[in-house]
Image (cartoon, rainbow, N blue to C red):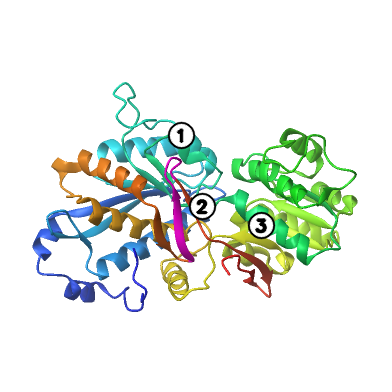
């Protein structure tokens, strides 16, 4: 188990933390387990980086309050973190990764926020370990947010603790088929200049809806078979009138296309800011679908703060909800640090405790002279993991892909809250 069941009291004031430390305090002060996080703290998706930093800070505080981390020689060390802004920009994410790997003593990195930035950043890492001809970065990454399927396969140094959207939407539409038998047709739109929104919509969401018997309004889309990625180009071509950009603030044309479709189910595949813009315009135009489905990333407090009334009834699959005692406490700790725990940021908590577990299992020393060896031990330790405890239950690992298998639930916006309406774990 990589986090304590009873989180109560594990976020005390600094003075109380000192009293909890073991006799090796002087040694611990000299040796620390340093981790680096980075995410979008500027730009349209800045809330995602703010949330991840808030949760990561809470996790580090809880680890240190519980006595820190045991190093390979028995020394107790505190964990330290530094968080950088990589915006949602590929070049900036690459720059941060290079800086952290070459100019700091960070054992491991956690980030970035956006899938497009992650895809580019992972490309500068050594693809296969022990390949002397590959001069890519040899620095372990454990990503907490970028969720596009399959990214971690780019390098054996890159790992992700994110849900699998293919499984999530597969099960969501199966559940909707059973619980809304009167719903037959679908229509939707997405942010076309945001990789996660666009590709998940065009390659996953529409396909999984088709797989479970929902038909694109007007007789379907050529090439759309229900298999992942099928007809994706045609999906984007068909939805030209109903798609938008992350920077857009006017959604009248798109909402009109939604209304004209007369579809039973409408899909809004975007992040909180434009999701709210679209939902508000849909309400203004009196668009009233039988079922409304959103993107995983919008299952956040930001969406409810921006448009709770307009989002009422929206279904979204998510890898986090405060349904366990520790998840509830993590949510409170995130709020205390100026952020929110959600599908993405909650993974930062799990990541910090995973790092502690791997440090203690692999004998990492946390000395400047052992930095390269420690980073390799961390990488090897992450790859060796089969299961770890997560906030919603056991998290499995796909070793050869660096990916996780996470539990998830279905939530619905109800009365200004995300309410769990189905728990596949049961």
Question: Which mark is on residue 154?
Answer: 1
Q: Is 288 on the left-hand or right-hand side of 413?
A: right
Measured as percent of width and height from the top left, residue 394 is found at 45, 62
According to the picture, the residue beneath numbered tag 3 turns out to be 171
According to the picture, the residue beneath numbered tag 2 turns out to be 46
Q: Is 288 on the left-hand or right-hand side of 363?
A: right
Position above or below: 346 against 368: below
Measured as percent of width and height from the top left, residue 46 is found at 51, 52
Q: What secondary structure is found at the residue carrying circle 2?
A: helix
CA–CA distance in space, label 2 to label 1:
26 Å
| Identity of the residue furthest to the top in this view | 133
Mark toward the viewer: 2 or 3: 3
User: Which residues, given as a range, are shown in magenta?
Assistant: 392-402
Q: What secondary structure is found at the residue carrying circle 3?
A: helix
Measured as percent of width and height from the top left, residue 242 is found at 79, 45
Point 62% across, 52% down: residue: 271
């Amino acid at each position: 188990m990589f986090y304590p069941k009873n989180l109560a009291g594990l976020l005390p004031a600094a003075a109380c933390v000192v009293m909890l430390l073991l006799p090796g305090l002087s040694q611990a002060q000299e040796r620390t387990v340093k981790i680096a996080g980075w995410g979008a703290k500027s730009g349209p998706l800045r809330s995602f980086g703010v949330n991840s930093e808030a949760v990561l800070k809470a996790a580090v505080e809880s680890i240190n309050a519980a006595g820190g981390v045991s190093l390979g020689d028995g020394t107790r060390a505190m964990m330290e973190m530094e968080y950088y802004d990589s915006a949602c920009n590929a070049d900036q994410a690459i720059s941060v990764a290079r800086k952290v790997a070459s100019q700091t003593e960070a054992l491991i990195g956690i980030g970035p926020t956006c899938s497009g930035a992650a895809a580019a950043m992972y490309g500068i890492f050594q693809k296969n370990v022990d390949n002397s001809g590959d001069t890519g970065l040899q620095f372990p990454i454990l990503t907490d947010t970028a969720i596009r399927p399959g990214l971690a396969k780019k390098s054996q140094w890159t790992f992700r603790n994110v849900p699998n959207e293919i499984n999530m939407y597969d099960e969501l539409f199966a559940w909707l088929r059973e619980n809304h038998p009167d719903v037959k047709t679908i229509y939707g739109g997405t942010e076309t200049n945001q990789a996660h929104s666009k590709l998940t919509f065009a390659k996953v969401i529409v396909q999984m809806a088709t797989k479970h018997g929902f038909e694109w309004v007007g007789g379907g889309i050529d090439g759309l078979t229900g298999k992942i990625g099928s007809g994706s180009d045609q999906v984007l071509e068909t939805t030209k009138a109903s798609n938008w950009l992350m920077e857009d603030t006017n959604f009248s044309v798109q909402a009109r296309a939604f209304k004209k479709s007369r579809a039973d189910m409408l899909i809004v595949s975007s992040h909180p800011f434009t999701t709210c813009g679209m939902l508000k315009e849909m309400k203004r135009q009196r668009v009233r679908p039988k079922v409304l489905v959103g993107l995983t990333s919008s299952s956040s407090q930001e969406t409810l703060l921006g448009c709770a009334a307009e989002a009422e009834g929206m279904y979204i699959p998510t890898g986090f909800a405060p349904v366990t005692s520790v998840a509830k406490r993590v949510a409170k700790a995130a709020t205390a640090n100026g952020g929110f725990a959600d599908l993405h940021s909650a993974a930062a908590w799990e990541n910090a405790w995973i790092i502690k577990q791997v440090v203690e299992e692999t004998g990492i020393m946390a000395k400047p002279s052992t930095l390269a060896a420690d980073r390799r031990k961390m990488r090897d330790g992450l790859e060796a993991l089969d299961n770890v405890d997560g906030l919603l239950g056991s998290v499995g690992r796909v070793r050869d892909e660096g990916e996780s298998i996470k539990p998830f639930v279905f939530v619905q916006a109800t009365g200004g809250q995300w309410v769990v309406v189905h728990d596949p774990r049961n």
